[in-house]
Amino acid sequence: MGSDYAIEAEDLRRTYKARTGWLKPKRTEVEAVRGVTFTVGRGELFGLLGPNGAGKTTTIKLLNTLLIPTSGTARVCGHDVEKDTREVRRRIGYVFGGDRGLYDRLSALDNLRYFAELYGVAPRDQKRRIAELLDLVGLAGREGERVEGYSRGMRQRLHIARGLLHSPDVLFLDEPSIGVDPVAARELRRTVADLAATGTTVLLTTHYMAEADELCDRIAVIADGQIQALGTPAELRHRADGRRVVEVEAYGVPESAVESLRGLPGVRETAVEARGALQLLTVHSDAHVDVQGDVLRELAGIRLGRVNSREPTLEDAYVAIVSAA
Amino acid sequence: MSVLRVLTVGTLMHIKQISRSPFEIAITLIVPIVQATLAVYLFRAGGEQHRLLEAAVGAGVMGIWSSVLFGSGGAIQSQRWLGTLEMIMLAPRRPVLVILPITIATGLTGIYALLATLVWGRFLYGIRLDFAHPLAFVVAAVVCVLALGMFGLLLAATFVLMRNANALANTLEYPVWLVSGMLVPITVLPSWTGPIAAILPTTWGARALREATSGGPVWPSVAVCLGISLLCLALGGLALTYVERRARAAATLALA
């Protein structure tokens, strides 16, 4: 089996270089991943959590051979991603979220046949394997229809079937539940959990805390191209220990009011999330300081809804980690 | 055996994908009429009524070339848009086995342009389909399609690397028509175009088809066409391996 780990990343770095303009070319450099180090054990379900632009997808693409690291090394099942590219590719599956990545004008069956051939599934096994996977993702009976007529959830399930065709040892799932309805997302989580239970190593990136909390054995929080925290969901939750969270539903909170909340004694972070006409104001404070009264005083004159003071969750821990980055 | 299966299944799937595009269907319906008309009026104006079939065949080869050129560039670009370029390049196969089926598929769909140009020439302008060597014509047409597919592979290597592949395809269409003598004899072009014409498989493919149409030594042209295209295949295969690595370093396999 070689290495004890399914995935090993050591000081991975990736810089994107771009040039715009011809006469006076302007060169820009963006350091998307800045020294990422972690390992994933065989059969582990590992989550990579982070905000947009944190470097999650770049990290996955460095590990699955789609990008070459600017520096650092990575191994999948003991094979170097830069030098033993084909050996790595034989052992991995890659599924990403969204509508793209499939041949729209072909049927699901044709898509799977083509990728089975490309990914080296033995001809005698193809029919059986495709039927198994169509069954697994609930597309049996719809496989003859063109993908362009599929819903987003169906496409996502087809993506998963495609990623599993060659029974990969390691599966990279890049935000697989993005844009998928709650029922489909729950089915997808069940499929991912089943895969991990049967020994497939899964590296999952997601925005959804509940998904990471429910599925992952360990989670790495990545922000600004660096890993900010790594541990089990329970360990990460402890990162928010010593905090208290006040949530206020409000309408039309000006930025100046949010600024003044940040200046209140005991307040660590504030965040505003728009939910239609409503804004959800989240204030993190030291647990021993009761800031609720001060917060409501600062918001005097603003129409308010429900006010709630509670213990921190994994999501709050995540906010605390990312805000500190 | 496995290589042949990958190439065959890949070509069939890409033919299906290309031929179901409403845009492609519209183009392949309209362009042959325009090209047949262009060829016929050019040759009539030149007082060469007896060479109308040759003109129609030349126009048909132009159609195959357009299909391969825009097909190779367009297919790579559209795969980028579809998000499938990353998925196919991620396959544990040599890049040539992944890309060649796409360019062969564009050549095969392009053969429709040749047939349609001849049919429209027959119905609209009464061109008699009187081939000097009918069997040689079929063989030359098949070789021409395969040759252009392999030439397309060499082009595709560039298209994998460039995010704006279509821009390159646009600039290549007319010069290659002209230099290869698809419509205008090479002899009327400036002498410096000669060496360029000599190394293009399009020149020899068009020549083989013209000779099969109006009489002449078809097989030497077929052989040269095949030889150059095999060289394109070898170079394209090497270039793709290099380019795939460059694309992974430059991050051009995806749109962003």
Image: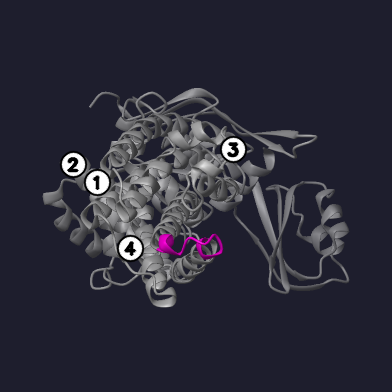
Label 2 sits on a secondary structure element that is helix
Label number found at residue B16: 4
Q: Which chain contains the residue that carries disc 1?
A: B
- Whether residue A82 is visible to the viewer of this picture, yes or no, is yes
Label 3 sits on a secondary structure element that is loop
Nearer-N-terminus badge (3/2): 2
- Contact flag, marks 1 and 3 (Cβ < 8 Å): no
**Mark 1 neighbour class, 10 Å CA radius: few under 14, some 14 to 19, many 20 or more:** many
- Whether residue A219 is visible to the viewer of this picture, yes or no, is no
Tell me the magenta residue range. Answer: B43-52
Label 4 sits on a secondary structure element that is helix
Q: Given the current orientation, which residue lies at the most extreme left position?
A: A124
Q: Which chain contains the residue that carries disc 4?
A: B
Nearer-N-terminus badge (4/2): 2
Separation of disc 4 and disc 1 at Cα? 15 Å
Separation of disc 1 and disc 2 at Cα? 6 Å
| Image position, residue B77 (x, y; %) | 51, 51
Residue under numbered circle 3: B190
Residue under numbered circle 1: B6
- Contact flag, marks 1 and 2 (Cβ < 8 Å): yes
Label 1 sits on a secondary structure element that is helix
Compare residues B231 and B102 and report the one nearer the observer. B231
- The answer to whether tags 3 and 2 share a subunit is yes
Residue under numbered circle 2: B2
**Mark 4 neighbour class, 10 Å CA radius: few under 14, some 14 to 19, many 20 or more:** some
- The answer to whether tags 4 and 1 share a subunit is yes
| Image position, residue A153 (x, y; %) | 41, 67
Instruction: Give the quadrant of residue B24.
Output: bottom left
Q: Which chain contains the residue that carries disc 3?
A: B
